[in-house]
Image: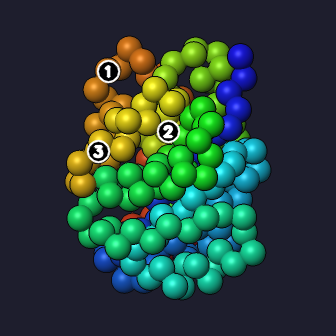
Amino acid sequence: MPVKNIGVAILAAGESSRLGRPKQLIQFRGKSLIRRTVNAANEAGCSPITVVLGSDSKKIEDELAGTRVTIVKNENWRAGIGTSIRAGVQNLLSQASNLEAIMLLVCDQPFVDARVIKGLIALRQKTNKSIVASAYAETLGVPAFFDHSCFEELLALSNDSGAKSIILRDRERVAEFSFPEGAIDIDTASDDERYK
């Protein structure tokens, strides 16, 4: 049975300390990383889309002008990734109480596109697993799909825990989507140069 009503939380609150400027705004193949991620979620047919911001939120908000996203400002972003996941999930559920699933994305994986998001959703249809996580670099992580049975766990994450703690908790309920390019993220100026 097809899963409808898939919301997306894009985690984009970090301050890019190793890069020295907001990585969300780095240009990759003609578009900023944050806009590429928003476009991918839109093209995959997901809705609603929430972007969680923290550091440099004004500049990133300006970059997202004209896109159909809800922006959530996480004032507590320095306390850890769990605060951003909770803020994103809470916002999505407040917008659409009938959500069947939530996709978690980050904006520093430049090779996440609509094909990847659709692939995660298709694997869910095929396996009916509660979680579909991306497999890369000998681990599982985001982008990841969580059906409604996982929402309470996402909302209960501790401040410094990411979604990986939920993904690895019970591997029986997880389908693995092969996405080797998921290991590539842009954290430093040399990463930026390497993948231009």
Q: Indicate which label's residue lies in the foreground, 3 or 1.
A: 3
Q: What residue type is labelled 2?
A: Ala
Q: Position of residue 29 (x, y in %)?
A: 68, 68
Q: Is residue 190 above or below residue 59?
A: above
Q: Do the residues labelled 3 and 1 touch (CB within 8 Å)?
A: no
Q: In this view, does 19 lie to the left or right of 107?
A: left
Q: Where is residue 186 in the image (x, y as percent from the top left)?
A: 45, 64
Q: Mark 1 points at which residue?
A: 170
Q: Which badge, 3 or 2, is on the more N-terminal residue?
A: 2
Q: Do the residues labelled 3 and 2 touch (CB within 8 Å)?
A: no
Q: Is mark 1 on a helix, strand or loop?
A: loop
Q: Which badge, 1 or 2, is on the more N-terminal residue?
A: 2
Q: Is mark 2 on a helix, strand or loop?
A: strand
* Residue in view at x 51 percent, y 18 percent: 129
Q: Which badge, 3 or 1, is on the more N-terminal residue?
A: 3
Q: Which amino acid does label 1 sit on?
A: Asp
Residue 49 falls in image quadrant: bottom right
Q: Which amino acid does label 3 sit on?
A: Leu
* Residue in view at x 61 percent, y 23 percent: 123
Closer-to-camera residue (90/179): 90
Q: Mark 2 points at which residue?
A: 144
Q: In this view, does 73 lie to the left or right of 17?
A: right
Q: Mark 3 points at which residue?
A: 157
- Cα distance, mark 1 to mark 2? 15 Å
Q: Is residue 84 above or below residue 71?
A: above
Kindly tell me whether residue 83 is visible in this rendering.
yes
* Residue in view at x 38 percent, y 35 percent: 152
Res. 108 mark: none
Q: Position of residue 122 (x, y in %)?
A: 67, 26
Q: What element carries label 3?
A: loop
Q: Quick one: quadrant of the N terminus?
A: top right
